[in-house]
Image (cartoon, helix red, strand yellow):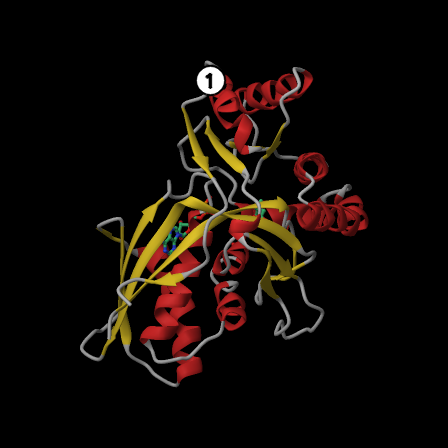
Amino acid sequence: MKITARAHTNIALIKYWGKRDEQLFLPMNNSISITLDQFYTTTSVAFRDDLKADSFILNGIEMGGHEVDKISRFLDLIRQTAGRNEYAIIDSVNNVPTAAGFASSASGFAALAAASTKAIGLDYSGSDLSRIARFGSGSACRSIYGGYVEWNKGVRVDGTDSYAMQILEESKWDLSILSVMVEARQKKVLSREGMTHTVKTSDFYSGWLETIDADLNLAREAIHGRDFEKLGTVLERNALKMHATMLGANPPFFYWTGATLDVMHTVQELRDSGIQAYFTIDAGPNVKVICQPKDEMAVKERMQQIQTVREVFVCHPGPGVSYIGE
Ligand code: ADP
Ligand code: DP6
């Protein structure tokens, strides 16, 4: 049976940065994200007994090598759990730029987890899906849910208690999240390699771990209390702290370009002029600017005026995974 599922990307407000177990995708710390309405992946999966290998079509192009291997390794987990051995045809379309810092891996693996488990006949709950999506990409486990989501790092060595939960529904607090694209090229250091290198070598990583619980508490309180200034202040500080751990690595590395700094300065200027806007940046040069819907137009216009900005996409909190055609 062919099953089609859709999952949206998410942007972390309090970042996942570092694994305590690389094989099981277990994070060092909890993270908090918003699922985005405009960026998503739609994936169809059909297991068939006449196939000799998995076939992965991404945006209409048949993938090979490393890309299909990654998908096959993920499907092996599903096949093992279900006690089945058929290969699958996976047809996926990203409504988000791929491998450009817009979290296509998060929506991609969340959609694949939902479609493949159902196609093979597993009856999975949200937390089961979150737990399995984690094995494709850690941040994918948060994309199972809509709105405001927290990934609980868990404490067990087998990782069974490491999965995400919704902390506030998307309809309960509307915010504007502007994805400010300064660069559309593939990134040089993947987040996976970047975080591993940071954990192993950064003089500042201990500072990250010592202060993360305070950041998480502030973010939770701000979300539950709909306190925008409090949330903005902690999310911007947390992002800068994550990037500081990379500057403290050996050898150091960083993802920012001149254009990234242009956007960061402009956000700070907006605040000086009385418009509340805050930025966050993942493992790439693009910036996400977060503001209240009443300021969305003003912030968007200001971002579009920056010479080095290529495009600005506007998102709001979006839904969790869904099945299409049901
Ligand atoms: P991004 O910022 O887009 O998440 P990454 O380099 O972290 O960038 O992840 C990109 C990788 O995610 C791709 O190389 C591919 O392996 C995987 N990916 C992207 N889209 C999909 C999809 N629709 N289904 C499965 N995997 C995907
Ligand atoms: C900076 O989830 O892409 O975006 O688990 O190795 O696939 P893997 O890493 P990934 O890392 C995301 C890092 C981040 C922060 C975040 O999304 O929380």
Asked if residue 139 lies left or right of residue 83, the reply is right
Q: Residue furthest bottom?
A: 83
Where does residue 274 sit, x and y in percent of width and height?
66, 19
Measured along the vertical axis of the image, is residue 185 above or below residue 48?
A: above
Image quadrant in which the C terminus is located: bottom left
Question: In the image as oriented, which residue stretches furthest toward the left?
Answer: 50
Q: Is residue 85 left or right of residue 287?
A: left
Could you tell me which residue is drawn at 77 percent across and 52 percent down? 213
Image x and y of residue 174, in percent: 54, 42
Residue occupying image coordinates x 47% and y 61%: 136
Q: Is residue 55 left or right of residue 203?
A: left
What residue is drawn where x is 57% and y is 28%?
256
157, above or below 229, in the image: below
Whether residue 321 is visible, yes or no, is: yes
Q: Position of 78 compared to 262: left or right?
A: left
Identify whether 293 is placed above or below 303. below
Q: Position of residue 62 (x, y in %)?
A: 23, 54
Image quarter (top left, top right, bottom left or bottom right) of the N terminus: bottom left
Helix, strand or loop at label 1? It is loop
Q: Position of residue 154 (x, y in %)?
A: 68, 67
**Residue 114 figure quarter:** bottom left
Label 1: which residue?
308
Quadrant hosting residue 312: top left
CB at disc 1 and ligand 1 closer than 8 Å: no
From where the camera sits, is residue 73 visible? Answer: no
Q: Residues within 10 Å of mark 1 (few under 14, many from 20)?
A: some
Q: Label 1 amino acid? A: Thr
